[in-house]
Amino acid sequence: MKDRKGSDKGTTNKEQILAMVRNAIIEKPEAIFQDIDLRSDTWKPIKEEDGNAITFVQKFKDMGGIFIYLENEAEFGDCMKQLAPQNKWEPLWCSSPKMQPLLEKYGLSYSAEPVIDDKHKLVSITDCEYLIAQTGSIVLTDYNTGSRKAYTDSDVLLILSRTDQIVSSVKEALQRLKNRLSSQEASQAVIITGQTRTYDIEQELVQSVFGPRQIAVFLIDE
């Protein structure tokens, strides 16, 4: 006996669903969108007169980032000696194996472990993998930071980078990362684009609920 829809009353809902799935697999519908290009870049090309460096700076600052240009490494040391006390960035927290010798070279004190108290902001300083011009983003891995907490737990995140680390797109950054690092060297990569943004129950924008409240990039022209 069949109901009004023509299905057997004796069959269970589970059997009907399985029959529908089976029929869908056997009778594949014709592809409606056959000419979709999934390989071409959908981003607007970077203006030739701007280049990757200027484009990154513009995008990064649009996302609320602080950008500081430096001519050389020694200038970074002098700059940090002035900015750290002025902005209450002390004590610096540095878990990056590559950054620690650099801080020691220029007499900048730091702690390898985070110093958490109510009187000081938790300020993490590290180098990065790449800077992405199209989005103003920073690419980090636990290989260069030494700890994932360096970019998840800090109130202020300070990034040291060089001009040869600026790439045009996310695709280029990930491809370079894949070619340069093995899975044994880096277990996680993260792309940071400004402060975190979310909306509360009243649809009001709330920033920096998770992650750093302030991000600064020191770019050395080398």
Image: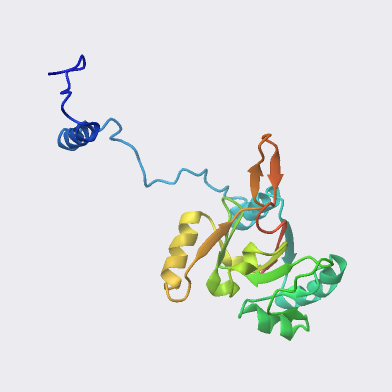
Quarter of the C terminus within the rendering: bottom right
Residue 167 lies, in percent from the top left, at 54, 60
Q: Residue furthest left?
A: 1
| Along the viewing direction, whichever of 194 and 135 lies nearer the viewer | 194
Question: Could you tell me residue 62's position as x and y percent?
Answer: 69, 47
Numbered disc total: 0
14 w.r.t. 107: above or below: above
**Which part of the image, by quadrant, shows the N terminus?**
top left
Residue 210 x %, y %: 65, 55
**Residue found at x 19% / y 38%:** 25
Q: Nearer the viewer, residue 219 or 146?
A: 146
- Location of residue 78 with respect to 165 vertically, above or below: below
The residue nearer to you, when weighing 16 against 152, is 16
Colouring scheme applied when the structure was drawn: rainbow
Vertical arrangement, residue 86 with respect to residue 193, above or below = below
Note whether residue 218 is visible: no
Residue positioned 54% across, 71% down in the render = 142
Any part of residue 74 in sight: yes
Toward the top, the furthest residue is: 4
Q: Is residue 127 left or right of residue 216?
A: left
* Residue 122 placement (x, y as % from top left): 74, 67
Q: In the image, is 136 to the left or to the right of 105? A: left
9 over 111 or under it: above or below = above
Q: Residue at x 84, y 67 (%)?
A: 119
Residue depicted at 72% across the width and 51% down the height: 64
